[in-house]
Amino acid sequence: MLLVTPPVSDSTETTGGPTVTPHIYFCRSPNMEDFTCWWHPLSNLTDGEQVTHILTYSTEQEANLECPDYVTGGPNSCHFDSSHTSIWTVYCLTVTAVTTHRNYTSQQHCLDVAEIVQTEIPVNVTYNLTNAGSDEMGQNALISWTYPVPGHVQYGWITLVYELQYRHVTESDNWKVKHPLREPQVELLGLPVDDYVIRVRCRAQHSKLWSCKLLVLILETGVGVLALLVMAFSLVLQTKRIKEFFLPAIPKSRIIGIDPVLLKKGNLDEINCHFSNFHSYRPPSSSEEVWDRVKTIPRGYSAGHGQSGHQ
């Protein structure tokens, strides 16, 4: 079911007093396929007086037709669905308030459906910082959005034109404008680090009626820089732990069960005692060298003959 929200409007005539006759104040088509009109009802009624409002319309082909749907557009409205809507056709409408005493008829309101097209408000506005961390040249922000009813534009009846407005949060009236935009995105270049208010609206290319402006987004260009600072600070804190993880300390060479101090003292007996636990170890032997005794024989002495005599 199609839901149509009536526009906000003053309920009095231009004179500022009560509505002495009904008054058609706004008509809108979101897609050139249907449209809705709203009116101000009769208000100068006596207490308890009953009133009924009837909308009638005429086209070049037919005259004095009654409103096809008083419900879809809400109170005091008339909705024309696609079977009752023709493009490039002029509709002339009047509203009559019927009371027990007399009838009150509004001024005639004529329209062409192509001239009352007012599109929906863009939705899903998002942004992405395309060069986060680069502060010297400012931040680049890619802003994108979507149209809420793609079916309104997919058949080519409507060509959308977008307008993006942005300003610093602290500058309430200093709006900068990007227009006209044919695509549902735009890149803002060189934004100084700050918070920005972003809003987007659109209209049909051949219509003068913009969609309602909507405050849609707070853009923070300093988020990327802050994130980098936090990451850098965390990295400094974790440097020692990371170094220990990737470059563990090289253990000192040692023999299990042997006291290094014992080796320095050079107590060989205790060392041999410890090494004797290894099956292949044999303590070094420290035997004395054996020397053969050599007897000195005097000159002229012959062994086995005794001492020689004089001849």
Image: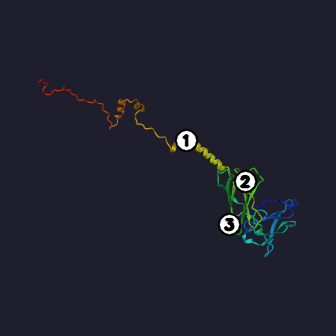
| Residue lying furthest left | 311
| Amino acid type assigned to the residue bearing label 1 in the image | Lys
Is residue 105 positioned above or below 238 on the image?
below
| Amino acid type assigned to the residue bearing label 2 in the image | Val
| Residue lying furthest bottom | 61
Specify the label residue 151 is tagged with: 3
Specify the label residue 264 is tagged with: none
Is residue 279 positioned above or below 109 on the image?
above
Where is residue 237? Give x, y as percent. 58, 42
The part of the image, by quadrant, that contains residue 34 is bottom right
Quick one: label 2, few (<14), some, or many (20+) residues within 10 Å? some
Disc 1 vs disc 2: which is toward the camera? Answer: 1
Where is residue 211? Give x, y as percent. 75, 61
Q: Give the distance between the C-alpha atoms of the residues marked 3 and 2, in whole angstroms.
A: 29 Å
Specify the label residue 240 is tagged with: 1
Task: Name the element at disc 3.
Answer: helix
Quick one: label 1, few (<14), some, or many (20+) residues within 10 Å? few
The part of the image, by quadrant, that contains residue 288 is top left
Specify the label residue 197 is tagged with: 2
Is residue 223 positioned above or below 64 on the image?
above
Sequence-wise, the earlier of marks 1 and 2 is 2
Please name whichever residue, 208 or 69, is drawn nearer the observer in this view of the structure. Answer: 208
Where is residue 61? Give x, y as percent. 78, 76
Q: Is residue 237 left or right of residue 26?
A: left
| Residue lying furthest front | 311
Q: Quadrant of the C terminus?
A: top left
Task: Name the element at disc 2.
Answer: strand
The part of the image, by quadrant, that contains residue 299 is top left
Q: Is residue 53 left or right of residue 283?
A: right
Q: Residue at x 40, y 32 (%)?
A: 263
| Amino acid type assigned to the residue bearing label 3 in the image | Gly
Query: Do the numbered discs 1 and 3 sit on residues whose CB atoms are within 8 Å?
Result: no
